[in-house]
Amino acid sequence: MRDFAGTPGTVTALILRMLQCFFAAGSIASMATTSTFFEFTAFCFLIASMGLQILWSFGLAILDIYALAKKKVIHNAGLVSLFVVGDWVTATLSLAAAASSAGITVLYFSDLGGCSFGEECQKYQMAVGLAFLTWVTIGISSVIMFWILAAG
Amino acid sequence: MRDFAGTPGTVTALILRMLQCFFAAGSIASMATTSTFFEFTAFCFLIASMGLQILWSFGLAILDIYALAKKKVIHNAGLVSLFVVGDWVTATLSLAAAASSAGITVLYFSDLGGCSFGEECQKYQMAVGLAFLTWVTIGISSVIMFWILAAG
């Protein structure tokens, strides 16, 4: 296994995991405080997907902190395979959730000639934007994980 | 570079590329024959993304046929890097297009209590389904490409 910035147990990996939790939590907070999100399947899917992302990233952040504190290297093939599968599943779900919510947001904002939900419109946009940021950060983690598995 | 089913210049790779073209063409055909698709940004994005996918997959299918006919191995690192970038970009776009169109389809079919576009509804569903199949096949190609690049 190669050892470079972003591999499990490094500070970069920990920062990426914390950013994922932060963006996903922001997306949920922004979406869940609207009063109409449950009318849209895609928005409920966004919340579910971001919730799963937080659980996953928080778990791996804890593991990174543990590895950093104990100065252990957690690069065995079994563990990395597990990380790769989890990362790719959550990354795919995050992108799908962000894109489907973005589709509906664009539908209301431009195709139907303006959003009629008042203040909630901005919250929808913010939730979608944060979901895309979550996807970017989990995407970076996924690529690094897959790389160390394949290069293993 | 390792040589296994699905790497450039093999029959499996060629079949995958042809399936990508087939599914993407079906998705465009299904969507473009509706009379209302241009009212939805997401549906236009779906057509654009599937069009790009056809161009890319068709080009690589030609290359696979050439490699099979000439019995050449096209595994040099520069070429594979190019394939990886193209595959990942088109795979991401395909998933985003399929998910955003699916978000709108689900909105009309279940959230707003039934689709009111008559026969076109089934075409929308078919286009979204075929777009997801396109994403599955390009996803498989992308993973294989990334694997041979990383495994070097």
Image (cartoon, coloured by chain):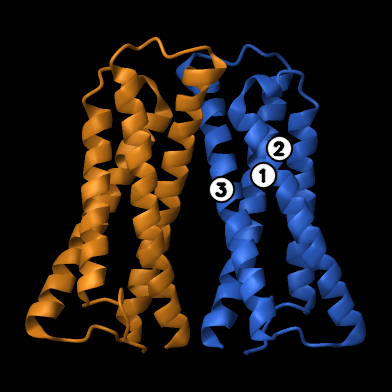
Chain colours: A orange, B blue
- Residue that numbered label 2 is attached to: B47
Furthest residue to the right? B69
Residue displayed at 19% across by 58% down: A58
| Sequence-first disc among 3 and 1 | 1
Q: Is residue B37 above or below residue A86?
A: above
Which one is nearer the viewer's eye here, A6 or B21? A6
Callouts 3 and 2 close, C-beta under 8 Å: no
Q: Amino acid at mark 1?
A: Ser
Residue A50 seen anywhere in this rendered image of the structure? yes
Labels 1 and 2 share a subunit: yes
Labels 3 and 2 share a subunit: yes
- Residue that numbered label 3 is attached to: B95
- How many C-alpha atoms fall within 10 Å of the one at disc 1: few (<14), some, or many (≥20)? many
Q: Amino acid at mark 3?
A: Leu
Furthest residue to the left? A69
Q: Nearer the viewer, mark 3 or mark 1?
A: 1
- Residue that numbered label 1 is attached to: B49
Residue A66: percent from the left, percent from the top?
A: 11, 75
Q: Is residue A100 above or below residue B25?
A: above
Secondary element at tag 3: helix
* Quarter in which the N terminus of chain B is drawn: bottom right
Secondary element at tag 1: helix
Residue displayed at 37% across by 19% down: A39
Which one is nearer the viewer's eye here, A122 or A33? A122
